[in-house]
Image (cartoon, grey):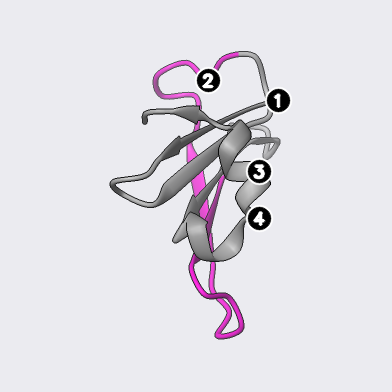
Amino acid sequence: MRMSHDPEADASYVRLVDQIHPGEAVTQIVVEDDRLPGGVVLDLDADGRLLGIEVLGASRLLRPEVLRRARRGG
């Protein structure tokens, strides 16, 4: 598992597999809940298996120590 964070966009991505190849994430599920101070998008492969999680508004949803450990960039 690897996590990256783009502070300019305030978005983080948690990759649950070693690599996500172009076109491999065929389904995106947007998690919408008024209790979330940001957004979450689940990326799934053709078999419905979770590849990664995008966190929008990451500074509001993730703990600071988690963001500090993330790789910088997109």
Q: Which of marks 2 and 4 is in front?
A: 4
Where disc 2 sits, the SS reads loop
Residue placed at 57% from the left, 14% from the top? 19
Q: Dot 2 corresponds to which residue?
A: 20
Instruction: Identify which residue, 58 or 17, lies in the foreground.
Output: 58
Where disc 3 sits, the SS reads helix
Amino acid type shown at disc 3: Val
- Counting the numbered discs, the total is 4
| Alpha-carbon span between mark 2 and mark 3 | 22 Å
Check if mark 4's residue and mark 3's residue have beta carbons within 8 Å. yes
Amino acid type shown at disc 2: Ile
Instruction: Identify which residue, 47 or 51, lies in the foreground.
Output: 51
Q: Dot 3 corresponds to which residue?
A: 66
Q: Is residue 29 magenta?
A: yes
Label 4 crowd (10 A; few <14 / some 14-19 / many >=20):
few
Quarter of the image for residue 56 reads bottom left
Residue placed at 58% from the left, 79% from the top? 33
Mark seen at residue 1: 1
Residue 43 on image: x %, y %? 55, 41
Q: What residue span does the magenta drawing correspond to?
A: 19-42
User: In the displayed structure, would residue 39 be above or below residue 42?
Assistant: below
User: In the displayed structure, would residue 25 be above or below residue 31?
Assistant: above
Quarter of the image for residue 44 reads top right
Q: Dot 4 corresponds to which residue?
A: 63
Residue 61 on image: x %, y %? 58, 63
Q: Which of marks 1 and 4 is in front?
A: 4
Question: Disc 2 or 3, which lies upstream in sequence?
Answer: 2
User: In the displayed structure, would residue 40 be above or below residue 19?
Assistant: below
Question: Disc 1 or 4, which lies upstream in sequence?
Answer: 1
Mark seen at residue 67: none
Instruction: Identify which residue, 12 or 29, lies in the foreground.
Output: 12
Amino acid type shown at disc 4: Arg
